[in-house]
Amino acid sequence: MNYQQLIARLLKQIRGAKTQLDMSQDLGYNYNQYGKWESSQRKIRWREFSKLCKVSNIQLEKLLLIA
């Protein structure tokens, strides 16, 4: 598994049952930004990932300590 596949899998896990568009809108985008991250059309930046964790109620500190 390469880095992009790992990111796509992680993003799908975080999204759960929500649609990509729902997640994009939750993050403040009016287009399917989340889908672009999942398909590797665009790389997710650290500040975007941090915001995603906050919106998804994921404690980033705990996520990093587990890894």
Image (cartoon, rainbow, N blue to C red):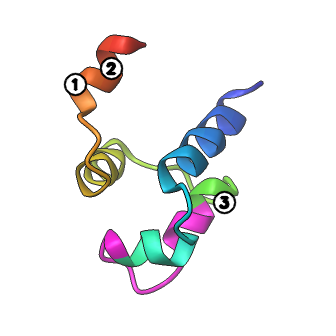
Along the line of sight, the residue nearer the viewer: 34 or 57: 57
Q: Which mark is residue 31?
A: none
Dot 2: what SS? helix
Q: Residue furthest bottom?
A: 30
Q: What amino acid type is highlighted by mark number 3?
A: Gln
**On-image quarter of the N terminus:** top right
Measure how far apart labels 2 and 3 are at the Cα level.
25 Å
Q: What amino acid type is highlighted by mark number 2?
A: Leu
Look at the picture and state if 20 lies above or below 43. below
Q: What amino acid type is highlighted by mark number 1?
A: Glu
For the point 27% across and 48% down, which residue is it? Answer: 47
Residue 14, percent across and down?
A: 48, 48
Closer mark to the observer between disc 2 and disc 3: 2
Q: Is residue 61 magenta?
A: no
Q: Residues within 10 Å of mark 2 (few under 14, many from 20)?
A: few
Which residue in the structure is indicated by mark 2? 64
Which span is picked out in magenta? 26-36
Which residue in the structure is indicated by mark 1? 61
For the residues bearing labels 1 and 2, Cβ distance under 8 angstroms: yes
Q: Which mark is residue 41?
A: 3
| 61 sits left or right of 26 in the view | left
Q: Residue furthest right?
A: 1
Res 2 → quadrant: top right
Measure how far apart labels 3 and 1 are at the Cα level.
27 Å
Measure how far apart labels 1 and 2 are at the Cα level.
5 Å
Residue 41, percent across and down?
A: 66, 60
Work out whether mark 3 precedes mark 1 in sequence or the reverse, and give the earlier one.
Answer: 3
Dot 1: what SS? helix
Dot 3: what SS? loop
Residue 5, percent across and down?
A: 71, 37
Look at the picture and state if 50 lies above or below 56. above
